[in-house]
Image (cartoon, grey):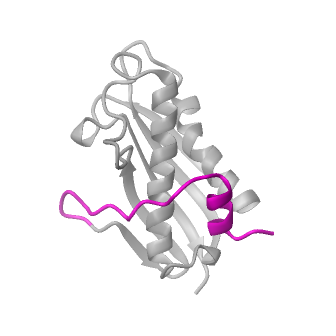
C-alpha cells in the first residue's frame, strides 16, 4: 500500500507550505493522539477561490476550492506529524463552511471536494464524520473553509 505522500504524488498534487494564521490562533493543537487543525481556507499560490458560491463562484470552482482546503489541511497534518503523514491513523471529522448565496443549497456536494481528497489520500482511514454548513461570510472573502480532527500515532 502506498504512503500518503506517494498517493499525493501519483495524483499529480503538491502539498503547499502550511499557511500561517491570519489572527490570534495556532494552525493546529495536538492533545494526546488527536490533532485539531484550524480552519483552512480555499487559498493557493494562484490566489485561491474567493467569493460567494452561486453568485460570483460556480459550483465547480467551489468544489475545487474545497479540494484546495483539503490540501491545506493535509499540509497542516504533515506539520503536526513532524513531516510524516504515515502517522495519520484516521481523519475523524471535517467541518466544512461554504460562503453560499441565498439560492445555493448544494453545500454538501461542495464540501465533498475535500472529503473525496481525504479518502483518495488516506483510503479507508480518510473516511470521516462531517458537517457542511452554508454561511453568510468567510474570512478574507474565501469561498470555502474546512477544519479537521485527526487521530495520529506518537
Q: Nearer the viewer, residue 82 or 32?
A: 82
Q: Nearer the viewer, residue 15 or 55?
A: 15
Determine the residue positioned at 46% across, 46% down: 68
Q: Position of residue 83 (x, y in %)?
A: 50, 78
Q: Position of residue 145 (x, y in %)?
A: 39, 44
Q: Inspect the magenta stretch and tell me whether residue 45 lies in it.
A: no
Q: Is residue 73 left or right of residue 13?
A: left
Determine the residue positioned at 33% across, 19% down: 56
Residue farthest toward the left in the current orientation of the protein: 23
Q: Position of residue 117 (x, y in %)?
A: 61, 49
Determine the residue positioned at 51% across, 51% down: 70
Q: Position of residue 17 (x, y in %)?
A: 38, 64
Q: Is residue 24 left or right of residue 108?
A: left
Residue farthest toward the right in the current orientation of the protein: 1
Do we see residue 127 in this rendering? no
Up the image or down, 149 lies above or below 62; here it is below
Number of marks in the image?
0
Q: Nearer the viewer, residue 99 or 61?
A: 61
Up the image or down, 116 lies above or below 103; here it is below
Determine the residue positioned at 53% across, 51% down: 94
The majority secondary structure of the magenta stretch comes to loop
Quarter in which the N terminus is drawn: bottom right
Quarter in which the C terminus is drawn: bottom right
Up the image or down, 98 lies above or below 152; here it is above
Q: Nearer the viewer, residue 16 or 95?
A: 16
Residue farthest toward the top in the current orientation of the protein: 103
Do we see residue 64 in this rendering? yes
Which residues lie in the magenta part?
1-25
Q: Quadrant of residue 76?
A: bottom left
Amino acid at each position: 500500500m502506498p504512503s500518503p505522500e506517494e498517493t499525493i504524488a501519483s495524483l499529480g498534487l503538491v502539498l503547499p507550505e502550511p499557511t500561517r494564521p491570519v489572527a490570534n490562533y495556532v494552525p493546529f493543537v495536538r492533545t494526546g493522539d488527536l490533532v485539531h487543525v484550524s480552519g483552512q481556507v480555499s487559498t493557493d499560490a494562484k490566489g485561491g477561490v474567493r467569493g460567494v458560491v452561486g453568485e460570483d463562484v460556480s459550483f465547480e470552482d467551489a468544489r475545487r476550492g474545497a479540494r484546495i482546503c483539503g490540501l491545506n489541511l493535509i499540509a497542516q497534518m504533515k506539520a503536526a506529524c513532524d513531516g510524516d503523514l504515515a502517522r495519520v491513523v484516521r481523519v475523524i471529522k471535517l467541518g466544512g463552511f461554504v460562503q453560499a448565496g441565498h439560492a445555493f443549497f448544494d453545500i454538501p456536494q461542495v464540501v465533498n471536494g475535500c472529503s473525496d481528497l481525504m479518502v483518495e489520500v488516506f483510503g479507508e482511514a480518510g473516511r470521516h464524520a462531517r458537517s457542511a454548513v452554508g454561511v453568510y461570510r468567510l474570512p478574507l472573502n474565501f469561498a470555502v473553509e474546512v477544519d479537521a480532527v485527526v487521530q495520529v500515532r506518537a
